[in-house]
Image (spheres, coloured by chain):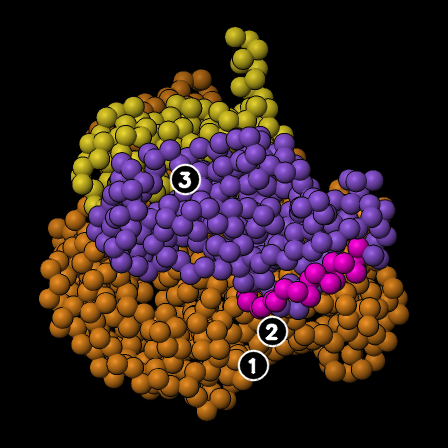
Amino acid sequence: MEIRFILNKKQISIDVKADAVLMDVLRSLGCKSIKCGCETTNCGLCTVWIDGKSRLSCSVLAASVDGCEITTLEGVEEEAAEFGRFLAAEGGEQCGFCSPGFIMNVLAMKRELQDPDLEEIKEYLAGNLCRCTGYMSQLRAIQKYMAAQKEKEVQA
Amino acid sequence: MITIDNYAKPATLEEAYKLNQARSSRVMGGMMWMRLGKAHVKTLIDLSGLGLDEIHDEDNVIKIGAMCTLRQVEECEALKELFGDGIAESIRHIVGVQFRNQATIGGSIYGRFGFSDVLTAFLALDTFVELYDGGIVRLSDFVNRAPDKDILLSVIVRKGKRKFRYDSIRRTKTDFPVIACAVVTGIVHGQETWYFSVGARPMKAALVEKKWEIPADASEEMIADYAKQVVSEFTYGSNMRGSAEYRRHLAEVLLRREMSSILAEGR
Amino acid sequence: MSMTGDHTAKSSAEEMRIVNHAVPKVDSEALVTGKAVYTNDLAPEDCLIVKIIRSPHAHALIKEINTERAEAVPGIECILTYRDCPDKRFTMAGQTYPEPSPYDRLILDQRMRFVGDAAAIVAGTSEEAVRKAMKLVKIKYEVLEPVLDFRKAKDNPVLVHPEENWRSLCPVGADNKRNLCAHGVSEAGDIEAVLASCEHVIDRVYHTQANQQAMMETFRTYTYLDAYGRLNVVSSTQVPFHVRRILANALDIPKSKVRVIKPRIGGGFGAKQTSVSEVYPAVVTWKTGKPAKILFTREESMTASSPRHEMELHVRVGSDDEGNIRGIDLYTLSNTGAFGEHGPTTVGLSGHKSIPLYGSPEAFRFTYDVVYTNVMSSGAYRGYGATQGIFAVESAVNELAKELGMDPTVLREKNLVREGQVMPAYYNETAKSCALDRCLARAKEMIGWDEKYPCRDMGNGKVRGVGVAMAMQGSGISSVDTGAVAIKVNDDGFYSLMVGATDMGTGCDTILSQMAAECLDCDMKDIIVHGVDTDISPYDTGSYASSTTYVTGMAVVRTCEKLREKICERGAYYLGCPVDDVEFDGEKVTNLKNGESISRKDIGNKVMCFNNEALSASEAFSSPTSPPPFMAGIAEVEIDKETGVVEMVDYAAVVDCGTVVNPALARVQTEGGIAQGIGMALFEDIVYSKKGKDYSNSFMQYKIPSRLDVGNIRVEFESSYEPTGPFGAKSIGEIVINTPSPAIINAIQNAVGVTIRELPATAEKVYRGMQELKD
C-alpha cells in the first residue's frame, strides 16, 4: 500500500507492506540514526517524533503514519549537535548507540516541560535505557544544556 | 512475530465492526503487545480517525475514548481533579513516555492483561465500558468475559465524589508490577462503600466490594484487620517476579496503607 | 639531541597539556548526530540475511534434518547443517594463542548442548524468505537428559562433551570425561592450621548469577569476499585479531584469507570478547561467495551469547579477636555452561583479585572447579570473575566485622593492602602504586560514614543503611597482552595514529590520541586515529582485561619517543647539522647552535619527495606485571521495613587508577560500571525453566536499571602513580563493577540485619530475611 507522510520536512510517498514497522521504513529511507535495541518496547533507542510526540518506531506500523509528520534525529541535526556537545563534554554518549533515541526524547522534553527538576527529567527519560554511562553524566549534560538555553533566552 | 495481510482504516464504526467480524481480523490499539504475539492477521483494523482519541468531560461522567493514549489519561486534569494523583500513579511507571504516547487505554482494558496497572485502577473506580454492539457494561463484568468480536469504544468513569488511592510494588521502577492495589471509597445508594482492586497477582485484576463504615479515627490495628480480611478474598500465584505468599503480604501492606491514607484525609 | 622529557616518568603533579584533561571523544560528533557508523549502518544492501535455527532442547542429538522444502522457498540461498561444517573443534574465546579455553566447538554440531544452541543456518535474500524457510526445516531430535545443576555436573554420568576430538591446549586441569573445563589450586602457608588457630572463622557460601552484559547493540557481523578472494569481516567485536584466528580455525582456512574490520561498537563489556556472531555469516559467504549479514535479536543476545559465569563461592576467613585477618580460603565452583569460553581464566580472578585486597594473611588457599552444563555458554563480562570473587570475599569480611562487632571500615583499615606490600595471592607482585587506604578514607567522608553507620531509622517505616566494599583488578594480562602502535607523519605534518586496540565506546581512540598528543607536543587535531583493520593496524590482543590504557598506552609512549628521534634526525638532515644539535618542540626542529629551524609541516611535506626513509615509527609493549587499580565503594540504601523494597539512595566511589588520563571518560566509566553493579546486586535475575529454557530473555524480563533505579552515584579519584604505566596510569574499565554487590548487600545487612548471599537481593529475599529474624 502507498502511504504519504512528511519526514524531516520533506514529503515522502512510499509503498509499504501492511506489517512493515516504521523503524525499518525510516532506516530504508536513510535515517540510520534510528537503532533497534530490544524489540520489546523497553529501550527507547528507536525514538522518533510523530506529530511532535516521542514514539517508539519499532512498534508503529508504517501504514498508520499516513498523513503524519515524522521527525528523526536527522531532522533536528543542529539542535542535536548543540546538545550533543554538552553530552560529549561529560563523556555521556560513550558508545553512542543509545544517543539518537535519547537525544530525541531530551529534545521532546525540552518542548514539553518547563524548567523540569531532576526527578521530572529522570522520569521523562526513564524509557531511554543506557548500559554504558550509569546515567549521571547524561543528567549533568541536560542540566548544563538547559541552563545554557536559559542564559541564551535571557540575553535574547 | 505478527504478520498482517491488510491494514484497514475504516471511515465509520459500523464499517470497523463489520470488518472485525471476520475470524482473522483484529482491532489494533497502540500495537505494543499485539506486535509481540505470534499471530497471522488478515485484516488489521485501525480505529484512529474515528474520534475515539478524546477525553470528554461530561456532566456526570468522564468518557475516555478507546484510542486515547495512556499519556493523555495520565495528564488528564479532569481525572486529577476528581481522584487526585491516583490515576497518574497507576500509569506513570509504565515503561516510558514514548510507550505511553502510543499505548491506548482501549488496548490496555481490552487486553485484560494480568500485569495491567490501568485495569487495576479503573476496576476500583466502578468503571463502565462502552462496546459497539454490547452497549455499556460494567468493567467488572467485562473483565471476566472472553475476548469476542465486539469493539471497545470508550471507558466511562462516573464523577461521583470518591477517594482513590493507587500503589504498586515493582522490581525496577519501570517493570511490570509484582503487585498492584487500588482502593476507592464513596457513597453508593446512601451507603459508604469500599472498592478494592488487586492486580498482577499475577492474575488479572479482580474487585472486592465492601459496605464498610470505618470511622475516620480508626486505629491502625483496626485498619490492618480490615486489610487482612479483604486480602484473604483474593487468590495469588507465583511467577518470576514473586511468590504467591509474598504477593499476598504486599497486597495486605499496600491496601492497609491506602485505606489508612484515605481515612487520614477524612480526619 | 634533546627530548622534551621521559613521558613515563612525568610526574602526575607536573602540568600536562592534554593527558589528565577531559577532552571530548574524537568520534563524539558523529555519535551524537546519529551518523551511520555502526556495523548494520554500513552493511551493503545486497547482503544475504543469515539466521539460525536454534535447539528447543537443553541436550539432544540431531537425528534427521530435512531442508528440502525450505530450500525451495524463493530467495533462499543456502541452508547449512552440521554436515556442511568442518569437524574440527575450535573456541570462540577471544584470547591469545594457545587459548586456555578448550577447543570444544564446531560451527554446527550434531549434539545440541543448550536451549538455543545452533542447529542450522539459513541464508536468503530477504528476512521474509528466511523466516519462512526456517519454519519449513524439519529437525528430528533425540532428546537426552541434560545436566542443569552445576553443583552436580562434575563427574556426572551425563557428559556435555563426550566427543573424542575435544581438545584442551593449555594445562588448565580440564577433562571432558568429567565435565571439567578447568581445575586448580594455588596456596601459600598452611591454611588449615591457620584457620584452626583463629579465634573467629567465617564460613559461608555465596552465589552469583550469569548476568548479561546487555550492551545496547546486539551481536552483529557482515562478511564479503574482496577482489583477492579473501573473506572480509566487518564486526562489532572487541577482538578483531583473535576473530581472524577464530574464523580461520572454524572454517579450516589459512589465516591469511581473513581480514577483520571493526567499525564503531555499541558497547561490549566483554560480551564481544567472544566471537559470538562472526562464524555464521562467514561460513555463508565462504560457501556462497556472496555478502552475508547476521543481526542477533535481543532474545538471541540474551539466550545464546556469552554472559558472566555463574559461580558458587565458599569462603572461609579467619581472624583474631582484634580483627587481624590471618587466613582466607576460597573454593569457587564456576558454571561455564555448554562451552568453555573464558571458563579456565575467569575463575582465576575470583581468587587472585579478591584475596590480595588483604595485605598480610599468614596463609591463603584458592581452589576451583569449572564445570560444563547444558545451559548457555558463559564468557567474559567486565570484572571477569573478580566481580564474583570480590562479592564473596568482601561479603565474608563484612560478616566477620559483624561477628567481631567491629565497624567494617575499621576492620578494613586494619587489613587492607598498602603501597609497597608484596601480594602473595597476586602472583607475588608488589603493589608499586596503591592508594586504597586513601580511597577508603575519602569514600567514608563523601558518604558521611561516621554519622550514618550502621543505619538510621527514617521514622516513616523506612530505614537507611550504609555498606562498604573494596576492589581491585589488573591492568592487562601480565606476560601475555601485547599492544603495538604505529604513527606516521603525513603531508603538512599531521600524524596518523594506528592502533589495534578496539574502541568499543569507551574512548580508547581518544585517550591514546591524548597520550600521543602529549608525547608529541601537538594538539589533538594534529592526530588522526584509525579504527581497527587487521590488514592495516598493528597487532593488538584487543580491548579486554583492562589492558588498553596501560598496555597499548605504553606502546603509544614508546612509539612517540621513537618517532621524536626520527623527526629530529630528519630535521637535522634538512637543516644540515648533527642530530645532537637539534631540539624538537612539537612544532619545529631547531638547530640550537644557530637558531635555524624547520617546521614539522615542512618536514612532513619534504619526506614525500626524494626520500629514502619512511618517517614513521612502530613499537610494541607487553608487561611482566599487571598493576592493579584499587577502589572503595560505599552504598547507602533505604529499605521499606514492611515490604523489603530496597531503594538506592547514594553511592560514593573513590578509585585509584593511577594517573587519570581523561577525567570525564574515567568518571563515566566508573559511574557506568557502578550502575551495572547495582543491576547485578538488586535486579538482574536469571530464571530457567525445569527443562533449561532461559526465561530472562528480553529487556522486558531481564531488568537492567533505568535512570530511576540507580540513585545518586558520586565518583572521585585518589591517584597513585604507577611507575610502569603511561604517565603513571593504570586501568579503569573493569574494576568499577566490583564494589556495588558486596557494598549494597552490606548496606542491607546494616539496615535490617538480613544477609543476602545469593544475588540479586530482591525485595522478596529481604522481606523473607526479616521474617526469619522475627521468628
Residue at disc 2, secondary structure: strand
What chain does badge 3 belong to?
B
Task: Tell me how far mark 2 sits from mark 1, CA to CA.
Answer: 9 Å
User: Is circle 3 on the same chain as circle 1?
Assistant: no
Q: Residue C65, image x and y in percent?
A: 21, 78
Q: Numbered disc 1: what chain?
A: C
Chain in yellow, by letter, is A
Query: Which of C289/C428 is in front?
Result: C289
Q: How much space separates mark 3 and mark 2, taking CA atoms? A: 50 Å
Q: Secondary structure at mark 3?
A: loop
Front-most of B205 and C484? B205
The answer to which quarter of the image holds residue B186 is top right
Residue pointed to by mark 1: C151
Q: Dot 3 corresponds to which residue?
A: B67
For the residues bearing labels 3 and 2, Cβ distance under 8 angstroms: no
| Disc 2 residue type (three-letter) | Glu
> Could you tell which of marks 2 and 1 lies nearer the N-terminus?
1
Q: Which chain is purple?
A: B
Query: Which range of residues does the magenta coloring cover?
Result: B223-240
Kind of residue at badge 3 = Met
Q: Nearer the viewer, mark 3 or mark 2?
A: 3
Circle 2 is placed at which residue position?
C312
Q: Which colour denotes chain C?
A: orange
- Residue density around tag 1, few if under 14, some if 14–19, many if 20 or more, within 10 Å: some
